[in-house]
Image (cartoon, rainbow, N blue to C red):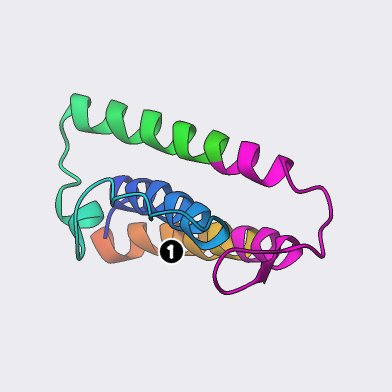
Amino acid sequence: MSLLGLLRHLAEVERDWRNWITSGDPLPKIYGEGDADFDGAVAEQMVVDSAYADLDHEQAATDATLAEHPDLGERLGRNGIAVRELLVHRVEEYARHCGHADFLPECIGGRVCQ
């Protein structure tokens, strides 16, 4: 687990959410199948810069897609997820992964975040 892996994972998740609420062919994975978002997270500046750009792009695309549906009760996509439900899930996902980021110092050096 790494901060860079979490960043790449969140970009991947943003794309997945758009797949949930559209009825067309799903967008392909950004980093590949399985744990490629974490496995490919290497400490190279180009990879870091790309991850930030990917997250920014995917967040903006999800925001734009959701903005097309101002009725929070509207159900979208094949599974009929409500816009409100996706927004709540989005907040929950980011909060959970921010919590994961708190564990990293402890995993690396034994330091407990307070």
Q: Is residue 57 above or below residue 83?
A: above
For residue 88, what is the image quadrant?
Answer: bottom right
Left or right: 5 in relation to 72: left
x then y, percent, for residue 31:
22, 48
Which quarter of the image is occupied by the N terminus? Answer: bottom left
Question: Camera-side residue: 12 or 64?
Answer: 64
Sort mark 1 into few (<14), some (14-19) or many (20+) by Cα contacts within 10 Å.
some
For the image shown, how many numbered marks are present on the structure?
Answer: 1
Q: Is residue 30 above or below residue 101?
A: above
Q: Disc 1 on helix, strand or loop?
A: helix
x then y, percent, for residue 6:
36, 53
Q: Is residue 44 above or below residue 84?
A: above
- Which residues lie in the magenta part? 62-90
Report if residue 114 is visible in the image: no
Question: Which residue matches tag 1?
Answer: 100
Residue shown at the point (56%, 34%) measured from the top left? 60
Instruction: Say which amino acid is labelled 1.
Output: His
x then y, percent, for residue 112:
43, 65
Question: Camera-side residue: 39 or 113?
Answer: 39
Question: Camera-side residue: 48 or 112?
Answer: 48
Report if residue 49 is visible in the image: yes
